[in-house]
Image (cartoon, helix red, strand yellow):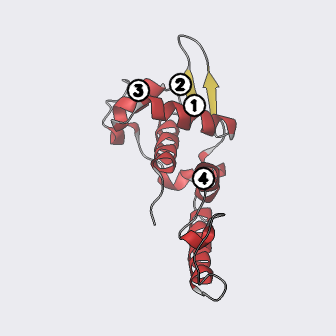
Amino acid sequence: MRLTHFSDYALRVLMYAAAQRERLITIEETAVVYKISRNHLMKVVTVLTRAGYLKAVRGRTGGFTLAVSPNNIRLGTVMRVTEPDFAMAECFTADNRCQITPSCRLRGVLSEALDAFVATLDRYTLNDLLLRPEDFGLKLGKR
């Protein structure tokens, strides 16, 4: 199983925002820190803002910051917001054409595994992932 880049980036954006709570950060800055696409990050930040995790400030001096405490951001909930689906095999999809689905037991086993995965993420919050600004390769007081 592999998370989408979107979910991976969402977690990284939240981690960076949590480390920089005393100021607004920009998409440009975040793209440089992680060496990932600015355009992709714009989509991620938009989804996280709409979900209420980030607060965006428009304008020339704008940026974004956490909208809620890291203690209130459950990793499992973030995954549910950012993952398009958890279709681990064809039998999980709407267009399932697998011939053995009616008698197959694999779907039940995979569902149980997925439930355990998300339940584990639900036990943790963003607070459990907190890093210091310098952990991102930044010097204190600088962007």
Residue hosting label 4: 84
Q: Please, is residue 103 above or below residue 143 in the view?
A: below
Q: Position of residue 68 (x, y in %)?
A: 66, 40
Q: Position of residue 6 (x, y in %)?
A: 50, 46
| In this view, the mark in front (3 or 2) | 3
* Label located before the other in sequence (1 or 2): 2
The kind of residue tagged 4 is Pro
Q: CA distance from mark 1 to mark 2?
A: 5 Å
User: Measuring 40% from the left and 37% from the top, which residue is drawn there?
Assistant: 133
* Label located before the other in sequence (3 or 4): 3
Tag shown at residue 24: 2
* Label located before the other in sequence (1 or 4): 1
Assign a secondary structure to mark 4: loop
Q: CA distance from mark 3 to mark 2?
A: 10 Å
User: Measuring 68% from the left and 36% from the top, which residue is drawn there?
Assistant: 50
User: Measuring 62% from the left and 26% from the top, which residue is drawn there?
Assistant: 56
CB within 8 Å, label 1 to label 3: no
The kind of residue tagged 2 is Leu
Q: CA distance from mark 4 to mark 2?
A: 28 Å
* Label located before the other in sequence (3 or 2): 2
Tag shown at residue 65: 1
Residue hosting label 3: 29
Dot 3: within a 10 Å radius of its alpha carbon, few (fewer than 14), some, or many (20 or more) residues?
A: few
Q: CA distance from mark 1 to mark 3?
A: 13 Å
